[in-house]
Structures are given as C-alpha cells and as structure tokens.
Image (cartoon, rainbow, N blue to C red):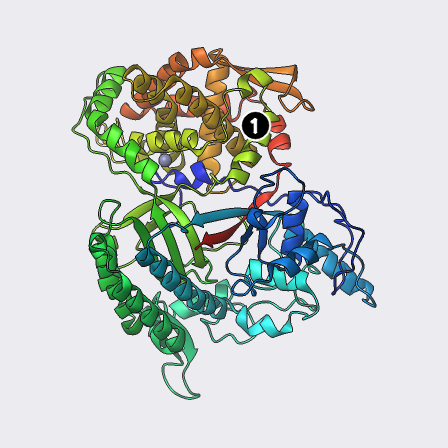
Amino acid sequence: MRKVGPALALLALLALVSACKSQATQSEQQPHTESTVPGPPRPSLTREDFNRAAVRLNLPLFWRADANSNGRPDDEEIATLLFYPTSDAPDLPKSRQAILGYFPTTAQGATPDEARRRGLVDEDLDQGAPTLIETDLRTANAVDKKLVQHMLAAAGWIDDIYATMSGAKALASRVPADDPGSKSLFRRNWGPACVCAKTREDPQCTAIPGAPKAVPDAYPTVHAVPDAAYCKSIAAQPNAKDLMGPFTVVDKNPAGATPPLVAVPYTERYRDPMQAISKELAAASADETDVGEAALKAYLDAAAKSFTTNDWGPADEAWSRMNPQNSKWYVRVAPDEVLADPCDLKAQFHLTFARIDQASLQWQSKLTPVEQDMEGQLASLIGAPYAARHVSFHLPDFIDIVFNAGDDRQPVGAVAGESLPNWGKVADEGRGRTVAMVNIGATPDTLAMYHKQLASLLDAEAMKAWADDPQAQLMTTILHEATHNLGPTAVYVYKGAKPEAAFGGKLASMLEELKAETGGVYWLEWLRTRGIVTPDLQKQAYAAWMAWALRHISVGVHSGTSDQAYAQLAAVQVGFAMDDGAITFDPAAPAANGTDKGAFTIHYEKLPATWEKLMKRVATIKATNDKVAGEALVAQYVDGPTVPQKTIAERELRFPQINYVYAVDR
Ligand SMILES: [Zn+2]
C-alpha cells in the first residue's frame, strides 16, 4: 500500500504534497501557436523558463544547471529525458533552438474557445515544475548497463499497458497533432484531463477539444467511467469474487449467457505486452552475470514467468527474498496498487527501478550497534510503567529511484514510500518489503526550492544552518524510522489497550508519528556526544527538520489528506519549541530572503533540551495511554494560536509542485 502509517513516515517526510501552484511565466496568459514563431533572440532565457518551454513543446530536454554561468544551455548542461515521444532519437541542436526560439502567441485562426483551451493547457503544464532525477551510469560496468537497457524496454511496455487500462491510449489519436502543449499534457497527465489546482475544475482545460473522458479499460461500461453504483453492482454479481479480483478485467458475456459478466485474466486481455515484458525480464536475467546478484536474477526469472501465468505468488516470494544486502538494485515490476482504478479493485501495472541508497546503508550500520542503548535511554527518560524491551531495527529499504514507469510515474509529485505486496501469502504473512525513495525530494532543484521556502520564513542567522545537502534530511528520516522501533510502539499494550483503542485511530497514529519525528531530532544530540554525528550535521539536520515541519504545516492541520498527521505533529513540535524558547517568531523581523517581513529564529543551542522534554512528554503519553494529555497537545498547538499557521501557509504555497522527469546517462 502507498500510505502513511506508523511503519511508514516516508511519504510525508520526503514528499510534501501540496496543491499544484503556478509559477508565473513570462507569457502565461497567451496561448501558443502550433508552430513556434521565432521570437526575438533571448540569450538571457532563464533555466526555469527554458525547462518550462521544453515541457510546453513536449521536447525531452532539461537544462540541469548553468555550470559555467554563461547564461546559455550548453551541450554538457543538458540532460535528455526519458519517456518523451522523441526520447530515443532526440535532436539536441534542433530541439534546443526550438526552445530558445519559443514564443507563446495566439494560435492562428483558432476560435476563442480553442485559444482559451490552449491557454489553460499551458497553465496546467506550468503548475508543475519539471525536476530532474538523473542517474549517471557512464562509468557503470557492461552488466549493469544491460540491465538498465532491459528495464527501459520493459518500462515502455508497462507504460503501454497502463495507458490502455487508464483509457488514455484509446483517446491518443484525438489530441490535436499541431499542438505540442496538448500532446505534452496528454503525455504527462496520462490522458486529456488537467490535474493541477488552478485548472483541474475548469471543463475547458483538456488536451482534447470537447473534453472526452478517459474510460478505464477494465470494465465494459463503454463510454462512461464506472461510478460508485456500477462498482457496487459488480459486488452483487453471482461471480463477484472473480470479477473483483485484482488481476482480471471485467467483460460482458455474449447476450443471454450467464453469468452476464465474466472475469478476463490480465494475461489474456494484455497478452502481447505482457509476453513482451516477460521476454524482456528473462533476457535481463540471462544477461545478469554478476554472481553477487543471484537474488535479483531469481526475481527476474520468477517475474518473467508470472507475466505469462498471472500467478503473482512466485514472483512475490522471490521478490521478498531480495534485500539491500544481497542486491544493489531495487526492482518491482507487477500489477500492484488499485488507487487509480475507479472501483479500487484492479491492480495497476508499474515498474519501480532503483538503486539501494548506499549512504543510508552506512548510517544503518552505524546505528545498529547502539540500538539497544537507544531503547535503554528512552526507557529511562519515560520511567515506570515503561521498561526497556529487546529491540532490533526494522528499517525500510532506502532506495534512489532511477526511473518510474506506469502507475508510478505521476504527473505531479511522486511515490515516496510503499509497502508491497498487497495480496497473497507474502502479504498475509507479513514478509513484504517497505521502501523509502530517498532521492525523491533530494534533487538539487528540490533542495533549492526547499531553501527558498525556508528563507521566506527564517531569519538570516537561523538560515545559516541550512545546507543544500540531502544528508541532513536523510539523517532525520533514518532516525525517524528507527524511533518507530523504540519505546511504546504501534503495537504496545498498556492496561490491556493498544494505542488505537486507547486514543482512537487518528490520535494514535499522530502520536506515533510525533514520537518518531521527535526521535528524528532528539537522537542527534545523543549521537553527537557519542561521536557518531558531527556538530555541523546536527545543526544542519535541525534546519532540515524545520524546513520539513513548515512545509507540512502549510498543507493544513485539518486538510483531510493523508498528510494531516504530519501537519499536526509538525505544529506540535514547532509550537512546543516556541513555548520552550528554542524557536521564536518576530512579526517585525526580516526573513532571510530580504523581502518578507516576519520571521522565525532558531536558538539551536537550546534545541537539545527542548527535544528531550518533548520526547519525554510524548513517549510518556504513549506509555500510559494518556488520552487527555494527548488531546491537550493537539488543542494547544494544532488548534491554538501559538504557531503562525496562516503566515507559514501563505509563504510556503507560493511555490510550484514538482513534476519529476528522468534521465539516465549511459
Ligand atoms: Zn513515521
């Protein structure tokens, strides 16, 4: 499942999901023409404008940085992106020229409706900031390069099935051929619909004139997207169990036949692309001659077979045996999540291809020797009735995404954590894997955006501790996950009651996450005194935590999204630190960006004592099932006036949402 739970902080830790926000463009209001009109030369086109124009033109180029500061996108500064129509044979000089010469103008001869539609399409595109996930495999060995090649080929077929299932493929020919913006929107959004906050409700915002809806392929509803009543009717069929299976589509039996509906296995309906994927995975296994990758090879073989049998159990078994110690890769290729299905029944195809994050492995090996001491420390901080247990860390696999395909590649935002599989013996017996995608939210552009967001709320002095370095973020993430294993956990029982019974589900999970995230900062001082964390990293991690907390608060403490628990705990942490004098907000102080008035300062030297107090408070609440004290924390900091939540939201939400794009240098 992709969700935020006690075992899974990562979603919210690593990928802040907020409404898509538009970044003003030079000519946002003007729709563009079918062929780019050569504009005046614009040698000073900014990198952001270049990358935005590339998206509007549906061209697979990304200017990653102006490394030599000459204001021009030089060859070596441009990455070629995957998953665009011309990714396989990009014409760099021609594409670059088209982007540099791009000048949005009104489409010639277009009706006012069509002109407005194209303008809205651009607006939807502009609300996602393209952000590069790049993997450099130029120095990789031939075996690894072959694996990437096979994964890319499999990804193409996964995209093909996903587009068929979503109903996008059936509409592809109706996207105006002379309109690169609409084609780009259709590609990015997996269909004609707009997805960003400012445009998604506008019926005229669509990649196809007339705004036809993509109709999922998994149900025989022909021209209509299945609604709740239709989904319910499936459950009432005599063969409902088959029809509701995750790995089948529902089809009509011939007229008069019973039952009226029939379940068609994926391997039958999507036979050709699934066979192609199977061949590709088998070829990947055959080319995997690295003796250290036996577990990966076994999974590739098993998955190749499952793509022909529709029996996913053997693939799951082989997959569950892969881990960060026996493979440097993370591969998951299967139908898994049902969130994109209108009836939440049919598993969608995806391919997650990633590398094990080596930095996180190093931190795990540093923490494992002291884990029992950490439990002892926490137990002594809480005191009776809590007593230290024997603990061992069950951390997620920390991975760096190379690329996502199918259901994983979202128009804006990205999957930042996942537990799989959802069905079968491996899931039932709790032998699945949980992963955290640590490079999501840690790309240079994302860190630069976090930097700007923080600089709009912190004063210059407090801002000095911020580092555009993913290590500080990673540190708090790992400590957060470790703390889920320490003290009273999600399965702790006091006086016969588990947290959910004692606190209610929502408060229970908020308190568990509050404990974990407080651990993310509390342990920094403890680890510093043991020489495991340097004073610099400690301070940087505090600043990274503050950036994280403010981003979450901005989503809204009662937003109703899965991020809500994080928004609430972040408000508790910031509010508690404010009451304790470790963080102060001065409405008259200038922010570090030099333009905003009203800023926080962080008294870094006071934070260790503050976090110890908060850790003691929240762990004691959990250890004694003290619902009254838990609710008091919420009333005081989530709903009380201590934290300037409105100011935080206003500044944070100026920034656009992230549209991840992918490149592999080979
Ligand atoms: Zn968590």
Residue type at mark 1: give it. Answer: Leu
Position of 472 compared to 69: left or right? Answer: left
Which quadrant of the picture is home to ligand 1? top left
Screen quadrant of the C terminus: bottom left
Can you give x and y, in whole percent of width and height, for residue 314 in the image? 22, 63
In percent of width and height, residue 365 lies at 24, 32
Residue 154 is at least partly visible in this image: yes
Percent x, y of residue 173: 61, 74
Viewer-nearest residue: 278 or 7: 278
Compared with 613, 171 (above or below) is below
Residue that appears at 39% across and 62% down? 149
Q: Ligand 1 near label 1 (Cβ, under 8 Å)?
A: no
Image position of 300 with respect to 28: above or below: below
Which residue is situated farthest in the left direction here?
Answer: 390
Dividing the picture into quadrants, the one containing residue 269 is bottom left
Place residue 290 in its image quadrant: bottom left
Task: Determine the residue positioned at 39% across, 59% down.
Answer: 351
Q: Which residue is mark 1?
A: 454
Q: Nearer the viewer, residue 624 or 249?
A: 249
Residue 366 percent across, percent down from the top left: 26, 29
Q: Is residue 58 above or below residue 555?
A: below
Q: Can residue 557 be seen by looking at this rendering?
A: no
- Horizontally, residue 470 falls left or right of residue 35, namely left
| Nearest the eye: 232 or 32 | 32
The residue drawn where x is 53% and y is 19% is 464
